[in-house]
Amino acid sequence: MLILTIIMVFFMLLVLTLAVYLLKHLDRPFMSFSPQENPTLRSSMQITAYLLIATCVLGVILLFFQQPKLQLITLLLASFITAFFALRISQLS
């Protein structure tokens, strides 16, 4: 159970890093796009970042329950949010 907890903490740190990266690049070029010139990309980045932060908060709360099935919620939610963002970016190009 300790190994799973450590892996989940690492995953949440990774997701939180992605969220902070998205928020920091709202005024800078993001990959080959410019969020300043594309309001759709900018709003997608903001929404994705805030959803990922909320997922991390939920993950920390669920981590205290020490139930592997509950921790799966965090993994799936962050994966779906990130996948939706990737699909959204692919439609912009």
Image (cartoon, rainbow, N blue to C red):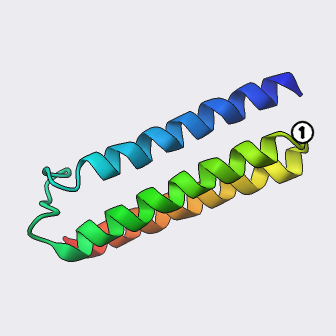
Residue depicted at 64% across the width and 60% down the height: 77
Give the x, y percent position of residue 52: 52, 55
Q: Residue furthest left?
A: 37
Query: Who's the residue at 20% across and 52% down the image?
Result: 30
Between 65 and 72, the residue placed more toward the observer is: 65
Quarter placement of the N terminus: top right
> Based on the displayed image, in which of its 4 quarters is residue 38 positioned?
bottom left
Relative to 9, is 68 above or below?
Answer: below
- Is 15 placed above or below 92 here? above
Q: At which x and y percent is residue 28?
A: 14, 50
Q: Is residue 42 left or right of residue 38?
A: right
Whole-percent x and y of residue 13?
A: 55, 34
Residue at (19% x, 50% y) in the render: 31
Q: Which residue is mark 1?
A: 66
Which residue type carries mark 1? Gln
Q: Nearer the viewer, residue 83 or 56?
A: 56
What secondary structure is marked by label 1? loop
Q: Which residue sits at x=15%, y=54%?
A: 27
User: Crowding at label 1, few (<14), some or many (≥20) Cα neighbours within 10 Å?
Assistant: some
Q: Can you give x and y, in whole percent of width and height, for residue 41 in the image?
A: 25, 69
- Indicate left or right for 51 with 61 as reference: left
Quadrant that contains the C terminus: bottom left
> Relative to 7, is 73 above or below?
below
- Number of labelled discs? 1
